[in-house]
Amino acid sequence: MLDLGDGPYTAEEMRAWSGDRTVRASVIRELLLSNRLPVDPKGIRLRGVRIWGNLDLQAGTTRCPLSLYHCYCDTQIPLDLSGATAMSISFTDCLLPGLEGRQLRVQNLELGGSTLSGALRLEDATIAGVLNCQATRLAAPDTQYALNADRLRSGAVLLSGGFCADGPVSMVGATISGALSCSGARLSRADDAGYAFWADRIQLSENAQFDRGFAADGAVSLRNAEIGGRLLARQCDLRGRDYQGCSLVLDGTRVGDVYLQDMRAGGSIRLVGAVVKGILVCEGARMQSPDRSRSALVADKIRVSGDVYLDRLRAAGTVRFPGAAIEGSLSCSEAQVGASNVSLVADKATIAADLFLDDGFTVGGAISLISARIGDSLRIAGATLADIGVALNATGLRVGGALQWAPTKAVDGEVNLEGAEVGQLEDDWSGDRGTANGFWPRDELLRLKGFTYAAIGGPHPATVPERLSWIRSQYGEDRSVPYSIQPYDQLAAAYRAVGQDADERAVAIARRRDLRVYGDLSASRWIANWLFDKTVRYGYQNWRAAFAMVVGYLSVVLTSVVAQHLNLVEPVGSIAGLHPVPSAMHCIANYPCFYPAGYAFDVVFPLVNVHQAEFWGINGAAPGGWALITITWIMTALGWVGATFLVAGLTSLAGRR
């Protein structure tokens, strides 16, 4: 080794070096490429040396390694290694004008601690071992990438340990058989599209690390990447945004696990169509859309083989998972989503386990779960939902387990459960919740048509009157929500399934009564409904009609006895030729006798005929006769009404059986 001092040296000190530290670049070229002069097998090693002139190894094949430590290349022309084939090249803590290494083939390329005043270009290069740029500083002109390694092939790439680039980094289509480490790197400028790190279609066999203080003033793009290990973007700061307002783009990427814990993003995070073979963790992350009406986290049609953790997430914009397929749980505990219109979208998403919107989960806009599929439970407990507009749209939702409803306060936004299906409904009606409709919305803001559940559970379920009030809270004075019998039938079925027959009957009666209040009935149908209610309670209390008919029968019996003894009952059949003339008080052989009990049967029970009314009747012309006739007419009318509703009630009962 030619050792003229191991530094460290400042750039000013290096530029002040005189001729006694100078080695001509042409000499180094001669030693590397020519066989005329002998070299040590360890290669050419220089420390603390000023290299004068342009080091040009383009298309050459070196016969030994080149190692420079604390050296200064005194030229404004970048080192040219384009198309070269080298054993190993190391520039450690050096001051370089830039490096051209397109199509370079080398075992290892070491630039640790060096400062390049120009770009580092490694397009189509092949580095069998490691590209080491730890603590390297790159400063490219405004029109160039600080590092361009498109289609690079390398064993591992280290852009960490204080790596700084005053310019964007491009690794589009690179193939790395090891890991890509950008931990602690600083990227201070973006390209025209807004990207500070652009590595679409990159292929990594191991981890991609953008953590431990990684910061970029532009977006990081890894579209359609293949990452065999994990993507680690923990505790990083992605301040910049691309032309779409995104700070991190992983659309179509296939990766093992994704860790975005405690990261900060000045724009959106995109994982559209991504495939995560493990888990997705965004715990404690901070992200925002360019404005609150747009998306902060976009994961449309993502596929995740494990769980998704959004706990303690702070998102100033919509969180989107429509069409997602998550084989574990989706947890949003303590998350705060401040979107002004729609906060969480998981329409047509499939979540194999649970969806947790609990323990301080807070949204400023709607939650949309239209036609989503949740294998286990949906937990909305300890959450704060939107107070205006739509709070929850879950039309067509399917939940295999329980829907747990216990928000922190009464919801004043619309909750739509039309066509939803859950295994069990668990809502909390304890304490003040019972007087506040279980914290479900009122005044036509609740939609329950088609909502089905196999059972009702939970530690504090609603009473029957409270549950009926819950159903009635769908309707308001302006009748904008049409009356539906399905919510009542569903509630009755739930009570019937657990043997609560009295509660089932109470709900069934209330359903028919509420039809008069909330249904659009004509006058005739309203009257029929009212009569059916007052007579047999819609078939659930048929004894009422039977009792009324018995009372009417006894009344007619008494009336008939009185009329008989007042001689107000006279024969109405043919009495020609009969002598003496028959009377109600005395029977004769050729004319039926008068029996008050039988006469009452003919008057009150229209379906029973004992033929008394065919032969006997009350004389209305006699004093007091009209009053008795009026009574019989009334009893006849009531008998027909009672019999009609009794038959209808029995028919309705048989139909339910």
Image (tube, rainbow, N blue to C red):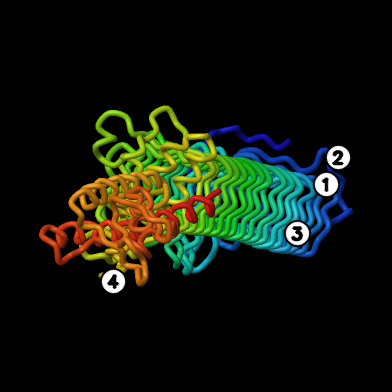
* Residue 603 badge: none
x, y percent for residue 316: 35, 52
Q: Earlier in the sequence, mark 2 or mark 3?
A: 2
* Badge 4: residue crowd in 10 Å (few <14, some 14–19, many ≥20): few
Task: Give, as a three-letter code, the residue at label 2.
Answer: Pro
Residue in front for this viewpoint, 461 or 164: 461
Is the residue under label 2 in contact with that under label 1 (CB below 8 Å)? Answer: yes
Q: Secondary structure at mark 3?
A: loop
Residue in front for this viewpoint, 11 or 435: 435
Residue beneath the point at 27% across and 56% down: 635
Q: Secondary structure at mark 4?
A: loop
Note whether residue 119 is visible.
no
Marks 3 and 1 sit apart, C-alpha to C-alpha, by: 15 Å
* Badge 2: residue crowd in 10 Å (few <14, some 14–19, many ≥20): few
Q: Earlier in the sequence, mark 4 or mark 1?
A: 1
Q: Earlier in the sequence, mark 2 or mark 4?
A: 2
Compared across the picture, whether 54 is left or right of 468 comes to right
- Residue annotated with mark 2: 41
- Residue annotated with mark 3: 104
Task: Give, as a three-letter code, the residue at label 3.
Answer: Leu
- Residue annotated with mark 4: 522
* Residue 64 badge: 1
Compared across the picture, whether 26 is left or right of 114 comes to right
Dividing the picture into quadrants, the one containing residue 278 is top right
Marks 3 and 4 sit apart, C-alpha to C-alpha, by: 89 Å
Q: Earlier in the sequence, mark 3 or mark 4?
A: 3
520 lies above or below 569: below
